[in-house]
Amino acid sequence: MEVVFPRWKAQVLWVLLTRGRLRFGEIARELPRIAPSMLTLRLKELEADGFVVRTSFAESPPRVEYSVTDLGRSLEPIFDGLLDWSARHLDTVTENRHNHDRHS
């Protein structure tokens, strides 16, 4: 689980799965609460794991894009399952948290 789901890693992968090939700044705009240094770290980890490919273009100014590999895409059904579960249970979880906070 630590390989796929440490803080921000799943969110970065989800953005790339749903939005396609993106530049660093585009990913950062989708995740405004992530620090640039953390985004850089997570992208490097995702690349090292084989979930994401980094493509550099020999242009001026230099351009780099990130996209999901087939291995990364293989996680899509897991994300879809989490979304389905969330849709079914979000109200219950929210109510449980509210009740817990009220009694704490």
Image: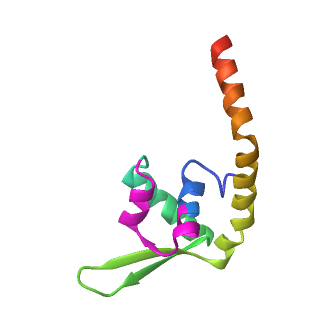
- Residue 77, compared with residue 36, is above or below; it is below
In the rendered view, would you say 89 is above or below 49? above
Query: Which residue is rendered at x = 66% and y = 32% of the image?
Result: 94
Residue sitting at x 49%, y 64%:
43
Q: Is residue 75 visible?
A: no
Residue 73 vertical placement versus 9 (above, below): below
**Which of the two residues, 38 or 68, is positioned nearer the viewer here?**
68
Is residue 32 visible in the rendered structure shown here?
yes
The reply to whether the magenta stretch includes residue 42 is no
Q: Which part of the image, by quadrant, shows the C terminus?
A: top right
Magenta span: predominant SS is: helix
Rendered location of residue 68, percent (x, y): 58, 74
Horizontal side of residue 56 vs 62, given as left or right: right
Residue found 43% across the figure and 49% down from its top? 34
Q: Is residue 71 above or below residue 37?
A: below
Please give the count of numbered marks on the rendered protein. Answer: 0
> 77 or 56: which is nearer to us?
77
**Magenta-colored span:** 15-32
Residue 96 at what x, y percent from top left? Answer: 72, 26
Relative to 45, 29 lies left or right: left
**Looking at the picture, how far across and down is residue 73, in whole percent?**
66, 72
Could you tell me residue 52's position as x and y percent? 56, 72
